[in-house]
Structure formats: structure tokens, C-alpha cells
Image (cartoon, helix red, strand yellow):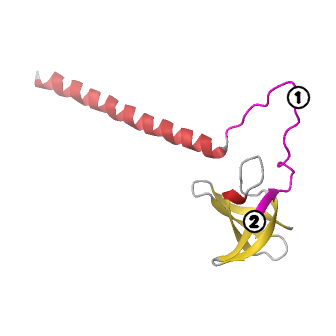
Amino acid sequence: MAKGIIKRYDFRKGFGFIVDDKSGKDLFFHKTEWQGDGPIRQGIAVKFTEKDSDKGPQAEAVIPVDGSTKKPSSNNKPAAKLDSLENRVASLENALGTWKVLSFLALAGVIALAVEKFVL
């Protein structure tokens, strides 16, 4: 297996690029090839299998080198489920959308009160 580092990863699109340690070339990879338990992040050292595709070099069976493919040992305490970066960003985007709607409604209320005060 070849080794490299995740150069870029776009979680919204679900793909990224790995730079090979030996050759220095970029390889495309899709999130379906990720075999780790943790989130996919830029700068993670990985092992992978290289293949050629119609669009260029591609990485398959991408495994983090730090061993995060191992399941946590079972103990008496349940493991806390960490939200992935993707889930946290989606949550923030939803909160921002709600904030925009509430801000608009508050502004509309202030304008309505001002109009009512000056018209009467």
C-alpha cells in the first residue's frame, strides 16, 4: 500500500485529493473509499491503493495511518458519540438560516411600529 497525506477534502461534495509521499502526485479519492472511523480532514496521513481511472490517478481503500480504523475497546461506559465536522457545519448553517428569518421578522415589526406611530 502507498502512503500519503490528505491534501484537500470537500465534505459537501464528498471527495478530496491525497498527495503521494513517494511520487508527489495528487490522487483523487471519494468518501466511499474512506475506511476510517473518524472524520476525513486535511493533513491526515493515510495508506491507500492506487489505481488509474478515466479521469486520472485515484486512491482506493483509504485508511488513516494512526489506526483509527480500530473499533474502540468495549468498557462499562458508553462512548460519547462525537459529531462530525459535516454535522456541526450543517447545524450552524441551519441556525444561521433561523437567525436570518428572526432578524427579518424583528425588523419588520420595528418598521410596522414606526409606521403606526407616525401615521396616527
Question: x, y percentage for residue 65?
Answer: 86, 56
Q: Which residues are magenta?
A: 61-83
In the rendered view, does 79 fall on the left or right side of 97?
Answer: right
Q: Residue 31: within the magenta? A: no
Per the rendering, the mark at residue 75 is 1
Residue at 47% x, 39% y: name it.
Answer: 96
Q: Image height check: is 27 above or below 108?
A: below
Q: What is the quadrant of residue 32 in the picture? A: bottom right
Query: Foreground residue, 72 or 11?
Result: 72
Q: Main secondary structure of the magenta part?
A: loop
Residue under label 2, please give it.
Answer: 60
Residue at 28% x, 27% y: name it.
Answer: 109
Question: x, y percentage for residue 57?
Answer: 71, 75
In the rendered view, does 66 fall on the left or right side of 53?
Answer: right
- Seen as rendered, the residue at the extreme left is 120
Mark 1, Cα crowd under 10 Å, few <14 / some 14-19 / many 20+, is few
In the rendered view, does 36 fall on the left or right side of 88?
Answer: right
Image quadrant holding the C terminus, namely top left
